[in-house]
Image (cartoon, grey):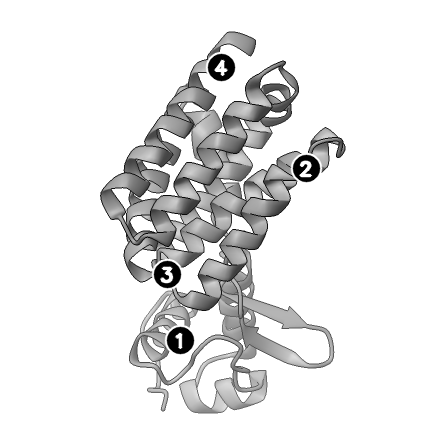
Amino acid sequence: MFSPIKNTKVYEQVIEQIRDMIDKGTLTKGDKLPSERNLVQQLQVSRASIREALRALEVIGLIECRQGEGSYIKASFQDNLFEPLSIMFMLEGSNPEAIWELRKILEVEASGLAAKRITSGQLNELCEITERFMNSEGEEEAITAEIDKEFHYKIAECSGNILIFNILRTVSILVDHFIVDARKLIIIHEGNKEILYSQHNDIYLAIEKHNSADARQAMREHLDFANKYKSQIK
């Protein structure tokens, strides 16, 4: 299972062995790691090195340590990218436009993949979200904005690519974080709601028909519209 460690930087080698077990499938999402005592015995290192390795793995978001229960491989990693990506964004002095460009690249391709890979169950879910969005007239703007995000997340999920899904969620959080209330401001501007209803319906219909080219085009037009209006209200 584990191999004894004898070199320097012991905690890094502990981490490497755990990562190697994940790579080989010995450990997977939600699995409980051996106890500290067990790890000490198997790896033949000090408890301090084990604890240092576990702390590092917790910081990077690979494991979660539950008081009185032990350490577990995380079952969900959707939020792990936000902090490092947002810090990098701020340190690099990037323009918010870069976030929208990345989002466009991801969402256009996600729509094309979703059109090919979406299941009947997922299509029903996307249809329900689309109908809720189009029937959200009179709802609070915050509710409409949340349904809008749910629509985009569902398409990313239906792409069948977990990397696209997780990165898109992070990018969307960055959009909301750095361009405050942009989505809601687009929605409340007179005439834009009807345009957004039509665009969302076009995207859904293209995916329903499993037409990847039309789905990509419909998503591209929608994001170009949102980005153009966002630029006017910054």
Q: Which residue is mark 4?
A: 229
In this view, the mark in front (4 or 1): 4
Mark 3 residue element: loop
Determine the image quadrant of residue 186.
Answer: top right
In this view, the mark in front (4 or 3): 3
Tags 3 and 2 in contact by the CB under 8 Å rule?
no
Q: CA distance from mark 4 to mark 1?
A: 47 Å
Q: Which residue is mark 2?
A: 136
Q: CA distance from mark 1 to mark 3?
A: 34 Å
N-terminal of the two: label 2 or label 1?
A: 1
N-terminal of the two: label 2 or label 4?
A: 2
Point out residue 213 in the picture as x, y percentages from the top left corner.
23, 42
Q: CA distance from mark 2 to mark 4?
A: 21 Å
Point out residue 135 in the picture as x, y percentages from the top left corner.
65, 39
Mark 1 residue element: helix
Q: Which residue is mark 3?
A: 118
N-terminal of the two: label 1 or label 3?
A: 1
Mark 3 crowdedness (10 Å alpha carbons): few <14, some 14-19, many ≥20: many
Residue at horizontal 53 percent and vertical 86 percent from the top: 34
Q: Which residue is mark 1?
A: 18
Check disc 3 and give the amino acid type.
Ile
Residue at horizontal 40 percent and vertical 45 percent from the top: 205
Instruction: Tell me the quadrant of the picture where the C terminus can be found.
Output: top right
Tags 4 and 1 in contact by the CB under 8 Å rule?
no
Residue 180 visible somewhere in the drawing? no
